[in-house]
Image (cartoon, rainbow, N blue to C red):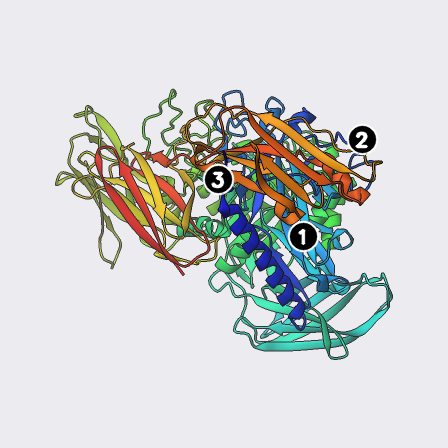
Amino acid sequence: MIFLSPAPYRLFIATCLLFALALASMQAEPAAPPREKIRLDAGWRFALGHASDPARDFGHGTGYFSYLAKTGFGDGPASIAFDDRGWRQIDLPHDWAVELPFDRRGKASHGYRPIGAAFPETSVGWYRRTFPIAASDLGRRISLEFDGIYRNARVFVNGFLVGEEPSGYLGTSYDVSEYLNYGGDNVIAVRADATIEEGWFYEGAGIYRHVWLTKTAPWHVAREGTFVRTDVAGPEATVTVDTQVVNEGHEAASGTLEQEVVAPDGRVLATNRRPLQLAAGETTTLTDAIAVASPQLWSLETPVRHTLVTTLRRADQIVDRYETPFGIRTLRFDPNAGFFLNGRRVELKGTNNHQDHAGVGAAIPDALQEFRLRKLKEFGSNAYRCSHNPPTPELLDACDRLGLLVIDENRLMGINAWHLHPLERLIRRDRNHPSVIMWSIGNEEWAIEGNIKGARITLPMQNFAHRLDPTRPVSAAISGGWGGISRTVQALGVNYIRQGDTDRQHTGFPGQIILGTEETTNQQTRGIYVTDQARGHLAPQEDGTSGGNAELGWKHYAARPWAAGVFFWTGFDYRGEPTPFGFPAVSSQFGILDTCGFPKDGTSYLKAWWTDEPVLHIFPHWNWSGREGQEIEVRAHSNCEEVELFLNGATLGRKKMEPNGHLAWPVRYAPGMLVAQGYRPGQETLTTKVETTGPAAAVVLVPDRPAIKADGRDVAVVTVEIRDAAGRLVPTAGDLVGFTISGPGRIIGVGNGDPSSLEADQFVGSSRSVTLGEWAAPNPAVNTGEVTFETTFDLPPPADGETYSLLLNTLGPRQTAELNGEILYRDADPAHSRVELANTGGKLKPAGNKLRLVSPVYPEWRDREGLAQFHPLSLRIQQAAPPWQRAAFNGLAQVIVQSTGEPGVITLRAASAHLPAAVTDVTAN
Ligand code: GAL
């Protein structure tokens, strides 16, 4: 006996109603806006496929006429008819690599995740999603846009292959207008294959950036079709705009092109209008120079953005309205004086970063991008190098808004379409961002950097970039291979002063811009002061893997005002490259911050010399039980003129701080309190202390913000602190903490900054399906009669926490279903015959269940063709997500909480075996 769970029916009927209402309202609407950009992040289904076994890749590519033989013949999950109800439901951004357990056979560079040629069963991911298109959309141009998929993404819409993109970092746009079902549902299927890597660092896997649906009139501004640049002379600015307009219609178009420069407060500052005529199929580019009186300039202190609103009109009708946010600013690099923003010299105080964060891997929500940038700004960093690939567009938006300068980096160097086309896409996508100040065409290209080929390849790439954007210099970073790229590149990026003589290069090439694109930090595991090889933990390094440390690097560039500044390797720790260790170390330790953004001691060194804020920080911590009487070096990072150190009230001496330096005292360890006092002429004395703490006594949850947006995307970053009875952070605590959440929020990742932690970053449920019975689709040549599917099946032996659902499919237009002798439904149409039957209450028999489906055969050949693409009956086996947990590392852990979309109070609870439970609220509104 089985009973039909009413829930799927109710859901189904509700969905139908909603869809009908949505369709009706779309049709009733007078007119959709001329341009729509719809986010398609929610409501995907995901499953791992297989890189080498088509049978385990859902039969994709095995059809008699497969997707390359006949257009629209996407097979396996690429077919419309494919049944994905057994797949897991996910929202984007998504990174399946970070969900996988660590595997010591994996690549060190990518953080020992089971991705790559040795792991075909976890290197391919499939995504599917359905979206409705209104009948009234017919005639518009509709594009499906992916900001980035890692990688080799094959994209299908309604069974049509629309493109295949090898890059894991470039955005793609596919015009799908002619493949859509207007007034009906449409299916996107994406197959991503991460087997071959692009970088030598953790890169994630899957659709880890946003997906959009863009709708325009046939006559519209081209995608990324504006290029805005600005010049400022006295109080007036000139905004020069190239606008690419395309007529994809079948008739000539004529009207006007209007440009408005809109101030940050919404005032229209200047307008330009011109007539426009386009033949059918024509694309044209028009240039306007627009004068703007006394604009606010974009700067690091006031990162104000203007908006260029481009409007295409036919008579009084608005045909397109395209917005380009931009900043009015000037930039100039002087090989003898450094970098100038709006005529003022700005020292580049930068960091390098990958798109990778604790808990979430490469799938970083926009709000977390901003969180990361704010962390970098807190220690005075004003610049960001996107190493070593085109970044996510929202990162650049955030740099624009927050006031950070960006080196935007290309992947491979070369002169063929394979290399130049990606460079073009990078520049066209990013050239309106005021934050972007330089293009980097490559990084450490060892095969060419020191030889004549490098010198040669650089020139055409550089010229190509200049044609697309004459306003920014082109750089390439080299690491010791001098005499090749270094001879021809406009802006030389020096990766590590240990590997080259910047002074000699400056003298030899006086017209060349020089900057430090990578430089060593203090390379340390956060909170660790004694290297522990076995645990992969690193004390602060005086001489890091690439030579030197933050102080040496900063002093070098600070003393050379002709150079434009320096970018440290790296701002944040990232997965992979666990140098100088291997497994179980899985993350890098180069960061000024750890993978969560918790500061290491080097943060205060840079903050002292990169900001005007008073800084006084002493380290290490003072919990050294067992080392009583032994000498421990205590250091101070400070911009005070003098610092005095006291242990338990007794002075250890007052010392003078050298500019850009640090101070150190040898101290015989005794538990208690270290106090430092920092003296600044004419100002209050600064005091800081480090105390020996008691044992862990409490867990405390501290969200970065009390409230987030109830938009399904915003995140709160919650710090988990282990404190002693006096409320002091216990700097050695490693308590395991479990988390539960209630209200309109979900946990999307946990981390603790331990580069050797092999704990899970995510706790996700699983879903898979197995087919039941034998099925042979009816011969398409048979035009009449009935089609029957009949099977007897057993349930798999019950496993802990697993739930089962039967998934029935549709064989024909009027189906009857019978289970164990009982009629489930009779003559149901396709909307009602494709049902899910939950086995709640154990109504299915463990063995010997009998199911029979009967229907008249579909009259249409194409409908019947779909029958070959699914199995009539499957069993879905789901397992709920295990509870979330993470050990603290040196007293800290992080929980990333995301809005689920509804307003309300999100409550996060933490529990640990020996500590009282903690709770915190975040309001979503
Ligand atoms: C550099 C390289 C970076 C990173 C770093 C690690 O040579 O450009 O991507 O690998 O070394 O030390």
Q: In terms of depth relative to the viewer, which is nearer, 483 or 875? A: 875
x and y percent of residue 85 in the render?
A: 58, 40
372 up-or-down from 696: above or below? below
> Which image quarter is the C terminus in?
bottom left
x and y percent of residue 309 in the render?
A: 65, 70
Q: Amino acid at mark 3?
A: Thr
Give the spatial CA distance, label 3 vs label 2: 51 Å
Badge 3: how crowded within 10 Å, few (<14), some, or many (20+)?
Answer: many
Q: Which residue is mark 1?
A: 185
Q: Secondary structure at mark 2?
A: loop
State the mark number for residue 629: none
For the point 33% across and 34% down, the residue is 889
Mark 2 close to ligand 1, CB under 8 Å: no
User: In the rendered structure, which disc, 1 or 3, sits on the residue that comes first in sequence?
Assistant: 1
x and y percent of residue 587 in the render?
A: 46, 31
Q: In terms of depth relative to the viewer, which is nearer, 836 or 510? A: 836
Q: Secondary structure at mark 3?
A: loop
User: In the rendered structure, which disc, 1 or 2, sits on the residue that comes first in sequence?
Assistant: 2
Q: Nearer the viewer, mark 3 or mark 2?
A: 2
Residue reaching furthest front? 821
Badge 1: how crowded within 10 Å, few (<14), some, or many (20+)?
Answer: some
Q: Quadrant of ligand 1?
A: top right
Give the spatial CA distance, label 1 vs label 2: 26 Å
Q: Which residue is mark 2?
A: 64
The count of marks equals 3
**Left or right of residue 502: residue 783:** right
Q: Amino acid at mark 1?
A: Asp
Q: Which residue is mark 3?
A: 570
